[in-house]
Image (tube, rainbow, N blue to C red):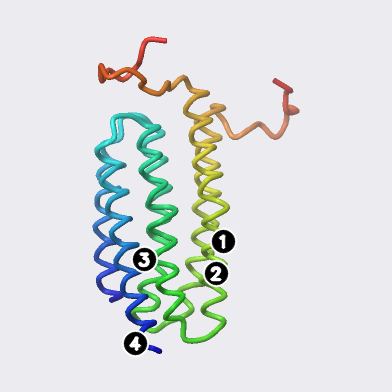
Amino acid sequence: MFAAATLALLATLTLVLVRALAGPTVFDRVLAGNTIGTVAVLLLAVIGFLGGRPDFLDLAIVYALLNVIATIAILKFFEFGSLGDPEEPEEQD
Amino acid sequence: MSALLDGLSWVCLLAGGAFCVVGAVGMLRMPDLFTRMHAASVVDTLGAGLILFGLLLQAPSWQVGAKLAVIMVLLVFTSPAATHALAKAAVARGLKPQLDKTGDESSSS
């Protein structure tokens, strides 16, 4: 049962990886990266159950948080050109 | 009773896996970014929700179930926010959704 879910998730991972490589714009790659993060969280949870190791779920929680923060940081960089300069004050556009 | 739980988690896990694959195929076949985001949200919502619910039924103790519930709540709150930020960034950088059927990347405004 868990093996079937793992196989489906691995298939999803390869399909999304193809989109990440082929994505014309950078935002396609960010979208694919976000989806890869979510699938990785699911893989961690399912393999944790497959191997009888419930502590994998802690990794899945941390990875879900990191995935969102990374996506938001990448988007901020690509939208505003930089992650903000600590010296000069934030201009009100 | 446990046979019912096993059967239900079998169905949930397989359905979740199927939705993940369908969402991923949608991400490959959709013409432009904004429709791909629509397909990717299928993976985030239904695929993740069904798989985590299937695991929830198999949770050996309440701690494991609580962790799975935390992951579900996290995904419910964070994936829409990330997708919204992605759409905002794409529109801010001038990526317009492709409205007409001509299939060219930059639709005439």
Please, what secondary structure does the residue beneath circle 1 have?
helix
Q: In terms of image quadrants, where is residue A73?
A: top right
Please, what secondary structure does the residue beneath circle 2 have?
helix
Please, what secondary structure does the residue beneath circle 3 have?
helix
- The label shown at residue B73 is 1
The N terminus of chain B lies in which quarter of the figure? bottom left
- The label shown at residue B3 is 4
Looking at the image, is A32 positioned above or below residue B7? above
First of labels 4, 1 by sequence position: 4
Q: Is A86 displayed left or right of B104 in the figure?
A: right
First of labels 2, 4 by sequence position: 4
Q: Can marks 3 and 2 be said to lie on one chain?
A: no
Gap between marks 3 and 1 measured at Cα: 17 Å
Tell me if label 2 and label 4 are in contact, CB under 8 Å. Answer: no
> Badge 4 sits on which subunit?
B
Gap between marks 4 and 3 measured at Cα: 24 Å
Q: Which residue is nearer to you in this view: B79 or A82?
A: B79
Which amino acid type is marked by label 2?
Ala
Tell me if label 1 and label 2 are in contact, CB under 8 Å. Answer: yes
> Badge 2 sits on which subunit?
B
> Badge 1 sits on which subunit?
B
Which residue is at 40% across, 23% downward?
Answer: B97
The C terminus of chain B lies in which quarter of the figure? top left
Residue B34 % position (x, y): 40, 32
Tell me if label 3 and label 1 are in contact, CB under 8 Å. Answer: no
Which amino acid type is marked by label 1?
Val
- Residue under pointer 2: B69
Gap between marks 2 and 4 measured at Cα: 23 Å
